[in-house]
Image (spheres, helix red, strand yellow):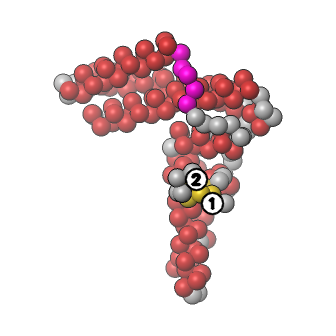
Amino acid sequence: MIDRDSEGVDSVDDPFAVLGVARSLDVSPSQVAAAHLRASARVHPDRARDAIERDRLVRESAVLGDAKRVLQDPVLRAEALLRLAGVPTMEVPLSPLFLMETLELRESIESAAAGADGEILGALRTQVAALQRAAMDDLRTALGAHSPPGLAMGDPEAARSARSALARLRYAARMVARLDEAL
């Protein structure tokens, strides 16, 4: 269940399986929290009978925490779904129109943040939320209704579309983080 990535960092192969939730882009934070709580109760280190078992339970608890962190973040959850479908998650070229729109949004965010203009920042948050929703909708379409059968079967168009939507979702997530910082 644990894999070591190219940088030598442990990561969860399938965070959905670790927590026992369905593979879906739309797993809710409350579903993730409840699944994490149930799983954590089973492997709590205080249940250990000896030091060896305690070490094992501590490691399992860490894996559960990592799975929770991945599934609670929409970008990381989308990356996990694509990885599980065998689709590389590297960035893809985005349309010049999208890049121009995000550049203008980022400049507006910085300008509003510098002026501490909460009203403008709120309006910009609404625009960025629309970008996030559009990217998530495109990801849902590329992944299929319940699981990634098209991607798993090697559909190159669905894979390209999913990677593009993921890239747009990453851009929006960075803008949301900056807006949260400014608000």
Is residue 159 magenta-colored? no
Quarter holding the C terminus is: top left
Out of 110 and 123, give the one closest to the viewer.
Answer: 110
Amino acid of disc 2: Asp
Front residue of 121/54: it is 54
Instruction: Please tell me whether residue 178 is drawn above or below residue 45 in the rendered image.
Output: above
Question: Image check: 108 left or right of 159?
Answer: left
Secondary element at tag 2: loop
- Amino acid at dot 1: Ile
Q: Position of 152 compared to 61: left or right?
A: right
Q: Main secondary structure of the magenta part?
A: loop
Q: Residue at x 56, y 69 (%)?
A: 59
Quadrant in which residue 158 is drawn? top right
The stretch of residues the image draws in magenta is: 91-95
Instruction: Say which residue appears at 53% left-offset and 72% top-offset.
Output: 58
Q: Percent position (x, y) of residue 34? A: 56, 56
Q: Which mark is residue 5?
A: 2
Whether residues under marks 1 and 2 lie with C-beta atoms below 8 angstroms apart, the answer is no
* Frontmost residue, 34 versus 114: 114
Q: For the residue labelled by badge 1, is the local secondary structure a helix, a strand or a loop?
A: strand
Is 67 above or below relative to 108?
A: below
**Residue in view at x 52 percent, y 52 percent:** 7
Q: Is residue 98 visible?
A: yes
Front of the two marks 1 and 2: 2
